[in-house]
Every structure is written in C-alpha cells, then in structure tokens.
Image: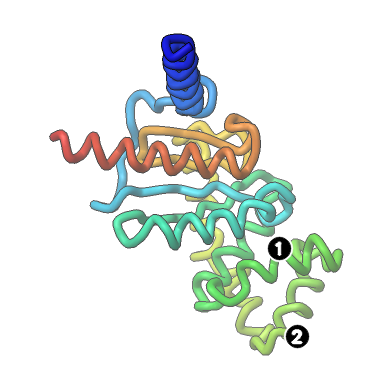
Amino acid sequence: MTRHLARLGLLFLLACACTIARAQPVAGKEYVVLDPPRAVKSDKVEVLEFFYYGCPVCYEAQPHIARWQLAAGPSVELTRVPAVSDAWASFARVYYALETTGLLPRLHWPIYDNHHFDDRRLDEEPNLLAWVAANGIDAGRFKEVWHSIDTRQKVEFARRTLGVYEVRGVPSFVVDGRYLTSARMAGGVKEAMAVIEHLVERVRKERAAK
C-alpha cells in the first residue's frame, strides 16, 4: 500500500512537471523570434505596444497592461506605437497630438471609453474637437497640433515602424527588439501578458549571462 501511494505521488509530481513545462510559451506559436533582432533605444528592457484606438481588443488590454507595467517596475520601459493604415491614420494623429500637448496620461483611456462605449466617433475631426473642448482643452490649439507637420511625421514614422517589426495585427508587443507576440498568437489578452512577462524575464537572464 505504501509503495502504491509512493508511486501515485511520483506520477502526480511528473504530471505537474509536464503541466508546468507545457505552460511555457513556445517560439513559433505564442511568440516569434525576430531575426535579426531590431535595435533598442534604451538600456532598460524595451516593450513596444502596437495598438489602435478603434480596436476593442486593444481597449480590453489596457487595464492588463497597466497592472503589468506597475508590477514590472522601473527596469522595463513601455513605449506605445499607434498602428497606421490609411483608415487608421486619424487615430494615430490623435495619439501624437495628445502626447505633444501633454494630455496623454489623462486622456489615453478616455479616448477608448468614449469612442467604444459612447459611440463618439473620435477619429472624425469635428467629434474629436468637440470632445477635446468638453475635456477643458483649447480645441483650437489641439487642432493646430493635430494638423501639424510634426504630428504627420510621427505618424509616418509609426507606419514605417510597423514594417520594421513585421507587425500584422493589434494589439502586438515586441520585447527588447527580439521577440514578437500578440493577443491573437497567445490566445487572448491575459495570455499575451503572461507571454510578455516570460519574455521580459528571459531577456533579463540573457543580459545577466553576458
């Protein structure tokens, strides 16, 4: 009896070990390895978030990203890159106009909220400017920034960046210029955040080994 219980215990431990092993993200499935790796601009572990304000999954990801960023600490640097296509360029301009005017920390989430839940169509200029004014912002000044050459140049840079990292959908994430994952690849938003955590830790270990 004792030997039987010991054998069951061993089988249980082996099963647990197999489950843990299967839980590890797999290259080519939950993420891809970028070859060659792309250059990074920070000594910190760089995580790029490719997003689109009109994307409901990107909206769903925001609280998960915020919690992850808080737990990740100062050694990780999150940089957002708005996805750009002809149809999405308007929202990319919104993002960079908010960034330039210093309004991004306050209005990044409200853009999602009001666009998706209130059907405000904030990628359309009249609706956007009315919304900006309702939030206590000088709509005339914001319009200037939204139409500025600087904003347009940033949007074009973002468009090129998508190509550099071979991003095919949003939300997508690139860790340290070496690993690309997305909600679609990982099987959902929560799963993507787990993959990002795994990849960030992998980068830390790789750097420590050098």
User: In the rendered structure, which amino acid carries the disc numbered 1?
Assistant: Tyr
Residue for point 59% across, 30% down: 185
143 shown above or below 29 = below
Residue 112's disc is 1
Side of 42 where 110 appears, left or right: right
Where disc 1 sits, the SS reads helix
Circle 2 Cα neighbour tier, 10 Å, few/some/many (<14 / 14–19 / ≥20): few
Residue for point 70% across, 80% down: 132
Q: Earlier in the sequence, mark 1 or mark 2?
A: 1
On the image, the x and y values in percent for residue 196 come to 46, 41
Display colour scheme: rainbow
User: In the rendered structure, which amino acid carries the disc numbered 2?
Assistant: Ala
159 shown above or below 21 = below
On the image, the x and y values in percent for residue 136 come to 68, 89
On the image, the x and y values in percent for residue 130 come to 78, 80
Nearer to the camera, 22 or 49: 22
Q: Is residue 27 visible?
A: no
Residue for point 69% across, 67% down: 111
- Badge 2 is on which residue? 134
Residue for point 52% across, 44% down: 193
